[in-house]
Amino acid sequence: MRLRLIPSRWARAFAVAGLLGGIVAGCAAAAHPVASGTQAAGPGATTPATAALVTPSTAQTTSTASPTPSPSIPLTPATDQPSPADGIGAEPGAASRSASPIPGAEIGSSFVLQIPILMYHRIISPALAGDSLPDLVVPPALFDAQLSALHTAGWHTVTVAQISQALQLHRTLPPRTFAISIDDGWDDGYTYALPILQRYGFHATYYVIAGRVGTWANVLTPAELRTLVADGMEIGDHTLNHRALPYLSAVEMRIQVMTAADLLAGFVGKRPITFAYPSGRYDVAAEAELQADGFGMAVIEGSGAWESAADRFAVPRVRVSPTTTPAFLLGELRALEPGA
């Protein structure tokens, strides 16, 4: 097996990862094919001509619009303390594997949630997006209009980590709850997306490719990641180098997952507890690795809103594109509400 040369700054972390044993088999509840979901925009989906322009910022923006903040979601009794097995509050760099089952993860469990998780990649003008795929680039004005429509309709956010905790503990969430995820870790998630999120009192989960932090231009810096966490955002694991897990050996897979988790923990002071598969590709071995590594949930690119306690490692999301109008997005979320 050939492994790529790795920077010396990560050599110790990789050496530790390489000493770990093979994948724990049979942890996934059910076999899944390799998946890479896409979602077409609805009819009449155009960017509103009247959407207000958004001014980028290099620092936190204080809203003057008196937004209604997202409500605090009581997932556990006040006396409960999260355990390291939940991935919450673990020591930075502690790439430990959970030895005991996570509550709510029993095979055959019928508990489900139906919380839409929106999937974004870049929030930036197409003219500034470089060679990013056009379908992944949502202009800030459109992002603002989409969130404004959801805020006006009474929707409020939780992070993916909060969905994971609710799922594991078999706790329901209030109506009109949704999550926002932003993949890859581009810095426009800070300069453009963060002020808009703050305007509406919303929070998001940022799935960061850890190996790019501090080494790539136009990628979130460690200081920006810390600011996002301080503002209530979640930092999730999106692997070390954005390599699709099903095509890797057991050792390479663990390096991509666990070394990324260690780096992110070092940047922000807490380990990631949710994961996004690169390009949405996953298989049984990838699901088993994540469960063995103590992650609470993993998201794919398949369309829908269905979080199952029996299989927390193949959770679908709602793709948002530059042709997704605010009205169409609102209609999608309404259609995904329980009982709709």
Image (cartoon, rainbow, N blue to C red):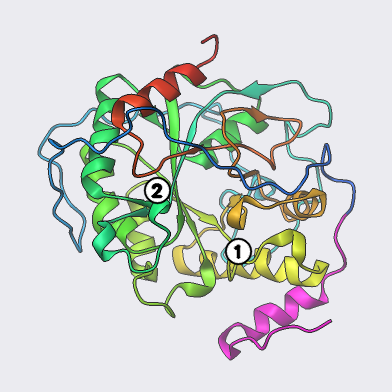
**Of the residues under marks 2 and 1, which one precedes in the sequence?**
2
Q: Quadrant of the N terminus?
A: bottom right
Extreme-top residue of the structure: 339
Residue 16 lies within the magenta run: yes
Residue 152 lies within the magenta run: no
Disc number at residue 21?
Answer: none
Using a 10 Å C-alpha cutoff, classify the residue at mark 1 as few (fewer than 14 neighbours), some (14 to 19) or many (20 or more): many
Residue at 56% over, 20% down: 172
Q: Position of residue 27 (x, y in %)?
A: 85, 45
Q: Identify the secondary structure beneath mark 2.
A: loop
* Residue with the mark numbered 2: 233
> What span is colored magenta in the figure?
1-24
Front in this rendered view, residue 239 or 127: 127
Q: Position of residue 250 (x, y in %)?
A: 82, 67
* Residue with the mark numbered 1: 239
Front in this rendered view, residue 256 or 84: 256
**Is 103 above or below relative to 27?**
above
Name the residue type under label 1. Answer: Thr
In-image side of 55 versus 167 (left or right): left
The reply to whether residue 50 is visible in this rendering is: yes
Residue 202 found in image quarter = top left
Residue at 70% over, 71% down: 255
Residue 219 found in image quarter = bottom left
In-image side of 232 versus 21 (left or right): left
